[in-house]
Amino acid sequence: MDNKKFDLNSLIGFFLIGAVLLWMLYYNQDESTQVEEVGTPEKQESVEQTTPKNELTTNSPTTDSLSIAKAQEKLGAFGYSSTLPSAKENITTLENDVLELKISNKGGQIVEAKLKNFKTYDSLPIYIVKDGNASFNLNFTTQDNRSIATQDMYFEPSLSKDGSSLSMKLKVSQNEYLEYYYELKPENYMFDFAIRSNGLSNVINKDNIQLDWKLKAYRHAKSISYENRYTEILWEYEGDKDDYTGQGDNDDAEDEEISWIAFKQHFFNSILLTDAPFERAKFVSKNLVQDEEVDTVFTKEFSASVPLQLKGGEFNETMDFYYGPTDYKILNEYKRNLDEVVPLGWGIFGWINQFLIIPFFNLLSGFLPAGIAIIFLTISVKLLLSPVQYKQYVSQAKMKVLRPEINELNEKYKDNAMKKQQETMKLYSKAGASPMSGCLPALMQIPVFYALFNFFPSAFDIRQKSFLWADDLSSYDVVAELPFTIPFYGDHVSLFPILASIAIFIYMMMTTGQNMQQTQPGMPNMKFIMYLSPLFMLIFFNNYASGLSLYYLTSNLITIGIMLVIKNFIIDEDKIHAKIQENKKKPKKQNKFSRKMQEMMEQAEQQKKAKK
């Protein structure tokens, strides 16, 4: 009887214990599911709503061990991080006078980067990173073949006492971890960043470690298409070489020995620099601007994939981040070739900007408003080129004096093109004049003009600086809004390009127009070019920086004024004509090249007669 009672009690106890165990198993299974799915904000929010605030630290040892076991089943050694109090999304802020960074313990990455001293075209704060437009992720496998993506993991934050540095640790135990380290310096857009680890040599598989950095570039300027033209990925490789993806889509750019990677957004930059060059990297750029009327948030989507190598079985990457303006002065101060991010032009064009235009404009803009500084810069350039331009004007005056005689030769030898060319060359030689003597001075001015064409769209100092009716010299000015969009022209009317086009047309009429001759076979139609240039400026410069149009307007007005002064007060056409007649009487000694050319033309003429 007692045995039966004992058996019954044992059975009842067995069922009671079984029910408790089933309840605990169900409870722990639900809790472990929450740990596994802690990667998404939605799942995390539900955890916070249903779980007491300090439950992770108050659970029994049995419950904690079961949670750790479940997390480790999915994440291996890194499952430990999912059971810590830091396993929920929190934000830590680092800031100085110019930059504010918000860093999430989820992924240990920057989720917001704000430039304090700048605004967008519509007066909003400038954000490089915000609302999930960027990600910084390490992909690797553990030695037990589990895939880890750090952007889904929870790091434990540790802020320094002075608030200038932050350590984010993804732990596999109390003293073994992967660490992201940030340190922000006063009044500096560049901050220290490091990836390092401790005790992971037996945890991480050394092969196939990939750093993925992505960014969708926010629109900051009035014209998204104009801003997009200067938005691209740039990088430095093999010590001092640089390359870029360009304006369109590009998914096959790859190089080796990468020193830095820049996600450039016209006037603002995200740059990742490394002390020890990355072995290689692949870059992808996707254009997001298909229709300016629709795509008004982002310009391009960038990504950089960088394979990383462990050192002694551990991470040890010392790097820097730069979140700041694309300002040549600031970038050049770092002495790491970051000025290559600013598109100053290649070769001699870049040198002119680097050593002449930029220093002089910085000097002017230090005490003058931006618009006045542009005008003074233009005047200075015109004065610098005045000796060359004077020779060009004198050559044009000579050609004008010779025009009647050239017309006579054209009429006399209208049926013999070869003879007409010979006689024309003789006339030029005797008179000491040549069409090329006017072209050469013009060609000598091209490097300066092209350098300035590159300078103004990249001049950070004129950004959001107003002048007359233009509220931003780095963007187009608007005097009228159109109710429709004209292809290539836009939906507005800019006044500076109109005035510059008129000035160019008047200048060309005073030069090309007065010397216009009948177009020779195979030669370009100068009258067509005379009308095409102002039309090109009128249409395409409607969406360009108004500072550039202001430069061209000022330059051509000064040129017109100089030409009028030279024509009316300096150059005497009668004296030039008399001098030409004297030169024609003197025996002209031909150089070897001219003599050879004349002999070849005479031989061609004789062969032509022989055939007839």
Image (spheres, helix red, strand yellow):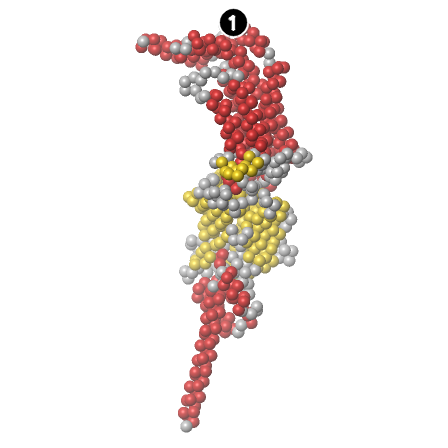
Looking at the picture, tell me which residue is in the foreground, 150 or 464: 464
Q: Which residue is mark 1?
A: 585
Instruction: Please tell me how crowded label 1 is: few (under 14), some (14-19), or many (20+) other residues with Cα within 10 Å.
Output: few
Furthest residue toward left: 611
Give amino acid for label 1: Lys
438, above or below 538, in the image? above
* Residue 173 seen by the camera: no
Viewport quadrant of the N terminus: bottom left
Q: What x and y, as percent, mark residue 42?
A: 50, 62
* Residue sitting nearer the eye, 193 or 433: 433
Quarter of the figure that contains the C terminus:
top left
Residue at 55%, 50% in the rendered image: 129
Residue 123 shows in this picture: yes
Q: Nearer the viewer, residue 609 or 77?
A: 609
Q: Residue at x 59, y 52 (%)?
A: 101
Callout 1: SS: helix
Tell me if residue 435 comes above or below residue 478 in the rendering: above
Image coords of residue 239 (percent x, y): 50, 41
Numbered disc total: 1
- In this rendering, position of residue 275 left or right of residue 521: right
How far across and down, in percent of the image, does residue 35 sit? 49, 66
Residue sitting at the far top: 585
Q: Residue at x 60, y 18 (%)?
A: 564
Residue drawn at x 68%, y 35% is: 367
Looking at this rendering, what residue extends furthest in the front direction?
483
Q: x and y percent of residue 54 in the render?
A: 57, 69
Farthest residue, direction right? 367
Q: In front here: 551 or 581?
A: 551
